[in-house]
Amino acid sequence: MTFLHSNYSDTTITNIMSRRECDRCSSPESGSDDEQYRSLPVGFKSPYVSTRSASPVDDEEINRQDLQHHVFRLACHGNFSAPIEDDLQSGIRVLEVGCGSGVWILEMAHDYPHSEFIGVDAGEVYPAPCDLPSNVTFLKADAVMGLPFVDGEFDFVYQRCMMSSYTKHDWDVAVKELARVTKVGGSVEMFETELTNIERPPEDTRFWDSLYDNSKSKEIDPSYVRHMGDLLRSQNFEVEQDHIPLALGWGRPGELHAKALYMACIAFGPQVCDSLGIGMDEYVERAQEQFTQFRMYRSWHKAPYAYGKKLRPM
């Protein structure tokens, strides 16, 4: 498995995030930067998040989304794994589906200025075009409802973190759309976290299991990410797939990853408390204990990815 290193720097982060300030100033209830972001890596201050996210869209969730992006980039040593470095340097058309805050797009656009990047999301939660790089565009679109592009329009299509948003049917429909808008010879890449099978688990995982049960009650099966490669193969792609290990609370970026997951658990709290028949205070205590055990047992989980080259149209 090959992961490409980004040439991203702290200075670049600051410059990219400053492009969003015009949007942030007009964002309601934006609050204090110091209060909201003091615990994040320097520069990660996106005020946007996809409305397809299963978590409530508030400042805390926005905070978590940006931290999650930072974790993935650290763990993967870059922003993608498909062998397209030379193509990106030369200049290609790239689409990100479910772009959320747009931070992946903005990083990639900086690293590969000769390529064109388009980010789509189900909600208009990405940066407005007040001061975007010339090679970046954001649009409102949902792969499940159909992407507003002709067949074969993109050289590279990227999607990640839809595990808690797509039903099985949504996955099938979305991957067909990703494949449709990809050129013959172009590539699609998907990256997810597989949280239903914890390696080196603590003895008591009842709290963690309750989150999985809550997702299944909404017809969302987080374990379905294991089928990403098969979904691409069904669309005539030559596929490579593997996973990276992500630690839960130990080492770096394991500590940051656990923090992002814990924040997600707390955001899910009001939804899960009813099914568990407990109050929020008890829910928080259980969450804290679960993550303490993950750290003690040095638990970890797989983050699967799949990428492939389109051999021919369907």
Image (tube, rainbow, N blue to C red):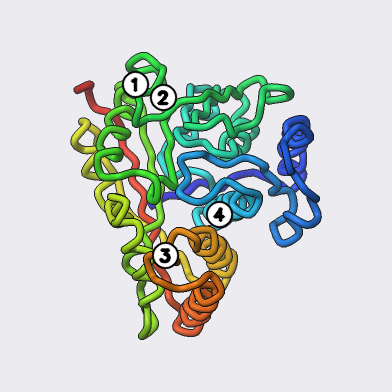
The vertical placement of 297 against 168, above or below, is below
Residue indicated by mark 3:
274
Gap between marks 4 and 1 measured at Cα = 30 Å
Residue 157, by quadrant, is top left
From the image, state whether disc 2 or disc 4 is nearer to you. 4
What percent of the width, then of the height, locates residue 120? 49, 28
Q: Secondary structure at mark 3?
A: helix
Residue indicated by mark 1:
183
What percent of the width, then of the height, locates residue 205? 37, 78
Q: As shown in the figure, which amino acid type bears the numbered disc 2?
A: Asp
Quadrant assignment for the C terminus: top left
Circles 1 and 2: CB atoms closer than 8 Å: yes
Number of numbered markers: 4
- Closer to us: 38 or 298: 38
The vertical placement of 111 against 32, above or below, is above
Gap between marks 1 and 2 measured at Cα = 6 Å
* Mark earlier in primary sequence (1, 3): 1
Q: As shown in the figure, which amino acid type bears the numbered disc 4?
A: Gln
Q: Is residue 73 left or right of residue 7?
A: left
The vertical placement of 188 against 36, above or below, is above
* Mark earlier in primary sequence (2, 4): 4
